[in-house]
Amino acid sequence: MSKKKGLSLEEKRTRMMEIFFETKDVFQLKDIEKIAPKTKGITPMSVKEVLQSLVDDNMVDCERVGTSNYYWAFPSKALHARKRKLDELEKQHSDGKQRKAALQQAVEKAREGRQDTEERATLQKELQSLREQRAHLKAELDKYRECDPEVVEEIRKSNKTAKEAVNRWTDNVFAIKSWAKRKFGFEDSRINKAFGVPEEFDYID
């Protein structure tokens, strides 16, 4: 035989509400923990959880008196709660319909002027041609940019700076070679060979 399937949370909630509606009484948690398993088949371990979920959803009222919590729920309250929920859902449905209508109207408006007419096709071709011309002209401009006087002047300045830097390092190399010759009596050729300095090494004019 197959094992009997347990109650779902929603079934437990429904059965627990029946306890309140049928008795129209006020209970403590310990009372519900005794009644629910016997009369409604709700497992003792889940009674507190189910009851709290009903309190959280405002379906069961809870009031603390002294050190004890008391729970109650009357059919009239549940009826009003369901009516409020229904009104809320109907409003959401109405708002949704209005948003849908507005979106459909916006889509229709956006489609206006986008029909595949001969004029639109011609304009699209002209736009594509203009884009290609723009790309071609930009490429030509980039190609001749190096002839721009400002660019040429910038290159000249960069070359001058680089030349000055090279000649400063050349000064440093000659100074080190002079020091090495005085200190150790090395020949130029020996120093050049030891440090990989080319024989034609000299200042840049």
Image (tube, helix red, strand yellow):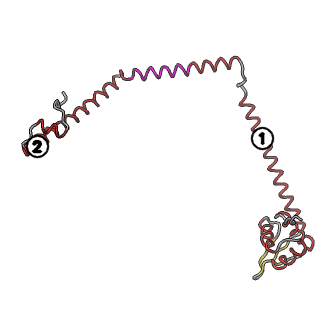
Q: Residue 191, position in %: x, y? A: 14, 39
Up/down of 23 relative to 141, above or below: below
Q: Residue 100, position in %: x, y? A: 78, 41
Task: Report whether residue 29 is seen.
Answer: yes
Residue that appears at 19% across and 34% down: 167
- Residue 9 is labelled as none
Q: Residue 150, position in %: x, y? A: 34, 25
CA gap between label 1 and label 2 equals: 89 Å
As drawn, is 141 to the left or to the right of 18?
A: left
Task: Report whether residue 77 is seen.
Answer: no
Up/down of 193 relative to 144, above or below: below
- Residue 180 is labelled as 2
User: Which of 117 and 7 lies nearest the eye of the viewer?
Assistant: 7
Compare marks 1 and 2 and give the one earlier in the sequence.
1
Residue that appears at 67% across and 19% down: 121
As drawn, is 99 to the left or to the right of 198?
A: right
User: Which of 68 and 94 lies nearest the eye of the viewer?
Assistant: 68
**Quarter assignment of residue 120:** top right
Up/down of 58 relative to 151, above or below: below
Highlighted range, magenta: 130-145
- Which residue has dot 1 on it? 100
**Quarter assignment of residue 128:** top right
Q: Amino acid at mark 1?
A: Lys
Mark 1 neighbour density, 10 Å: few (under 14) some (14–19) many (20 or more): few
Up/down of 113 relative to 56, above or below: above
Residue that appears at 6% across and 42% down: 185
Q: What is the quadrant of the N terminus in the image?
A: bottom right
Question: How many numbered marks does the figure carry?
Answer: 2
**What secondary structure is the magenta-colored segment mainly?**
helix
Circle 2: element type? helix
Q: Amino acid at mark 2?
A: Ala
As drawn, is 4 to the left or to the right of 57?
A: right
